[in-house]
Structures are given as structure tokens and as C-alpha cells.
Amino acid sequence: MASSPFSAIGVVERELEVAEANVARLRSLLAEMRSTVKEPADDFAGETMLEVAEAALRFDLDENTIRLWARGYGCGKKPVGAGRWLVSVQRVQDRISARKRR
């Protein structure tokens, strides 16, 4: 005995209701998770940041030196998706002062 097209439609409608309920539950769970997750602190918040080329000109240093300090001495950060280093004016100035004290 073949099933009627109406019973097949009913099955699909019930499956859609279940799927919609699951999506609603997942959206609620995601919203709850987002509300409890805190953004990571930006260690450079409030600091004046420059691109490497700008900093090299400003401090009369080689761009590779600026990149080395950004990476190795914590003078800069590479924002996600940016691909370029940004360096803190204050931290580069501090690094220059530390070099002069030697």
C-alpha cells in the first residue's frame, strides 16, 4: 500500500518544526554563551600605535628593527587579519631609552 502525498507532507512539516525548535534552542544557547564570554583584554589599550614604516621614520630606525622589537620585546601587536605589525610609541621610546642606558 502506497503512502499518500499528504502523509509525506505531514512528516516533512513535523521535521521542519523539530528543526526550527532546534535552531531556536541553539540561538538561545549561543546568545547566552556570548553574554558570558568576555573579550580578551587589549594590552595596548590607550596607547598610540603606529605602523612599522611610520615608526621607523619617526624614530629614525630600520623597519626590521621595529619589527624585531614588536615581536621580541613586546613593543607591538599584529591584529588578527591585518597582517601588519602595529607598534606602541611609548614602548618603542622605552626600548630606545633602554638601549641608551647600556
Image (cartoon, rainbow, N blue to C red):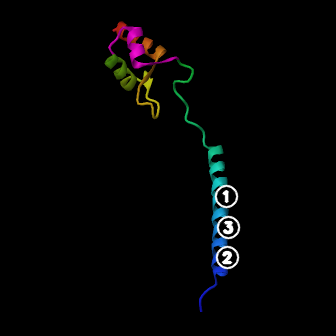
Q: Amino acid at mark 1?
A: Ala
* Residue to which mark 3 is pinned: 17
Residue for point 67% across, 58% down? 24
Find out whether residue 55 is within the magenta segment.
Answer: yes
Q: Are marks 1 and 2 in contact (CB under 8 Å)?
A: no
Pointer 3 local density, CA inside 10 Å: few below 14, some 14–19, many at least 20: few
Q: Amino acid at mark 2?
A: Gly
Magenta range is: 48-62
* Residue to which mark 1 is pinned: 24
Mark earlier in primary sequence (1, 2): 2
Q: Measured along the vertical axis of the image, is residue 9 above or below residue 37? A: below
Quote the CA–CA distance across marks 1 and 2.
Answer: 21 Å
In the figure, is residue 35 to the left or right of 84?
right
Closer to us: 13 or 67: 13
Q: Are marks 1 and 3 in contact (CB under 8 Å)?
A: no
Identify the image quadrant of the N terminus: bottom right
Q: Residue 74 at what x, y percent from top left?
A: 42, 24
